[in-house]
Amino acid sequence: MIQHSLYRSAVVLILMAISMINCTSSSTKQVTPTNVTAKSDWWKSAVVYQIYPRSFKDSDGDGIGDLKGIISKLDYLKSLGIDAIWLNPIYTSPNDDNGYDISDYRTIMKDFGTMEDFDLLLKGMHERGIKLIMDLVVNHSSDEHQWFKESRQSRDNPYRNYYHWWPAEKGTPPYRWSFFDVNSNAWKYDTLTNSYYLHYFSQKQPDLNWENPKVRNEVYDIMRFWLDKGIDGFRMDAFQFASKDTTWPVLPKDYQKDVIRYYGKGPHLHDYLQEMNKEVYSKYNVMSVAEGAGSSPADAMQFVDPDRKELNIAYHFESVDIGNHINDFGLVKYKQIFERYDSTFKDKGWLAIFLANHDQPRMVSKFGNDSAAYSALSSKMLSTFVLTMRGTPFYYNGDELGMTNIRFNSIEDYNDVDTRNKYTALQQSGGNLKAFIELKKQTSRDNGRTPFQWDNTTNAGFTIGKPWLKVNPNYTSVNVAMQEQDPNSCLNYFKKLIQLRKQTNIFTTGAWALVDKNNPDVFAYTRINGNERYLVMLNFTSKSTSINTGINLEKATLVLSNYPKTSTIGNLQPYEATILKY
Ligand code: GLC
């Protein structure tokens, strides 16, 4: 009660401050990044923007985004204020899994261009002060990679041990579940040598055998090839699965419900990472990010504890794998995840913060509200979250516009191997296909992969050809050209957030603590560095609500909000995001 009256007494003062500074006139200025940390820690203060190259910008009219397309948009990227770009795989690939099945690690996929285009892209980025992070996909290769073609040939081929094989005379291999296989079986029988090979993902993505030192050295050479070209780091795809227990124990029934525990903590995983660090990473000042990092904060710490000399940044999946929509799992549970991770990482180690990527639905459709009334507001609210948390923000292209799920009605519209294979499996088993399509409208990875929306010309200005995946029809109102002109747009709000993050170290390194933790509607937290104190309040609902901050806000000033007029202290409007300095 005492606290409550304090808010009330602060209301008048705060309202005065608020009326002077509103969202569109906030005091954020263009500034260069603050060097908050030692140069070798540059990745801690970086804002990483993820580009899905297939969907970003097509330069030659074949309907597929390409490197020249990205080059043509470098000034847009610079205007965002981001520090680094993570590019999904651009290497030669038959595209069973859109580039995550690599058949040549040292060449560029024809759809995307040439090595000359790549060199120009890297140069153009570096000239604009933007770093480049590449995807390193080495848990598996494509079955069309020369190594696998050799490996299949005979049991005594020199490349045989580059992959995991099980001779059929030993009987059926112990069952392993596959993420993408139609039959949910990770062992595929191959007649040529009467053996099975292992593929945790699709049949066209055979798992490399990391126990073989030759494989490890091949990978280190590939890494040096790109790092010597001047790239600034790698995002390590699915690497937690690289080490297998090759005694192939029989696993408990239904273990796939806890698959990370059985696949993600192989016996030599950290030996490999330490070796990789010694051989490669320690020789370059680059970013190394683990996709997936076990199933607990303690697991994640093992990847990035500086004393262990493995990787720089871990991104865990607990915050995205929790359910299909925020209303299903609830905000309190959601907040607890971040609290658990932050308390483990407060003194050492480093995490990524993200709400979306190319494997997820659109952030606004999952954590916000993509209805016409609330799409822009909730999108800005979620951007506020990603850009004010502790950790390195990984922000997915298109989210700065508030792009939403497309919600295809037919399986024919889908491209994603995961969605298509699961549909086929269900079809074969006589499952409920209608319910499946309904579910995929919310969850399919293709929701996040529709072409980037540049303007309101045909195909959103993405291509003059036929786009490889349909364009979201809302491009006529959600696009860069319109949002650049509108000072209140999601895009301009995103830019302000980035500038804010660069004006002060606080959002990078400041202590983080939840406020009003059991509030089911509001995600609020403080960021504190010495005398500098910020309060971030985010209403995750479409109703007006209240918050009990317990903080004396008498002298607080408004830093940024997604509303032109913020609420009285203690109250928040639907999807309101408000940052106060106090
Ligand atoms: C990672 C990628 C995903 C891909 C999978 C297999 O999870 O993000 O897109 O399908 O690995 O490489």
Image (cartoon, rainbow, N blue to C red):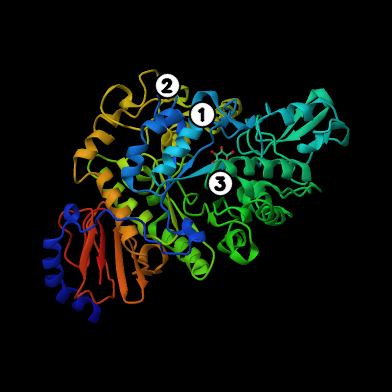
Tell me: is circle 1 under 8 Å from ligand 1.
no
Q: Which of labels 1 and 2 is toward the front? A: 1
- The answer to whether residue 174 is seen in the rendering is yes
Q: Residue at x 85, y 35 (%)?
A: 171
Residue 159 sits in quarter: top right
Q: Circle 3 is placed at which residue position? A: 234
Q: Circle 1 is placed at which residue position? A: 116
In the displayed structure, would residue 547 be above or below residue 261? below
SS under mark 1: helix
- Disc 3 and disc 2 in contact, CB within 8 angstroms: no
In this view of the protein, which residue sits in the foreground, 83 or 98? 83
- Indicate which disc, 3 or 2, sits on the residue closer to the N terminus: 2
Q: Residues within 10 Å of mark 1 (few under 14, many from 20)?
A: few
- Indicate which disc, 3 or 1, sits on the residue closer to the N terminus: 1
Left or right of residue 301, residue 185 in this image:
right
Q: Residue at x 52, y 52 (%)?
A: 317
Q: Residues within 10 Å of mark 3 (few under 14, many from 20)?
A: many
Query: Ligand 1 lies in which image quarter?
Result: top right
In this view of the protein, which residue sits in the foreground, 166 or 1? 166
In this view of the protein, which residue sits in the foreground, 436 or 260? 260
Tell me which amino acid carries mark 1. Glu
SS under mark 3: strand
Give the CA separation, mark 3 to mark 2: 27 Å
SS under mark 2: loop
In the displayed structure, would residue 5 be above or below residue 315? below
Give the CA separation, mark 1 to mark 2: 21 Å
Tell me which amino acid carries mark 3. Phe
Q: x and y percent of residue 439 in the render?
A: 45, 37
Q: Residues within 10 Å of mark 2 (few under 14, many from 20)?
A: many
Q: Circle 2 is placed at which residue position? A: 63
Which disc is residue 445 wearing? none
Give the CA separation, mark 3 to mark 1: 20 Å
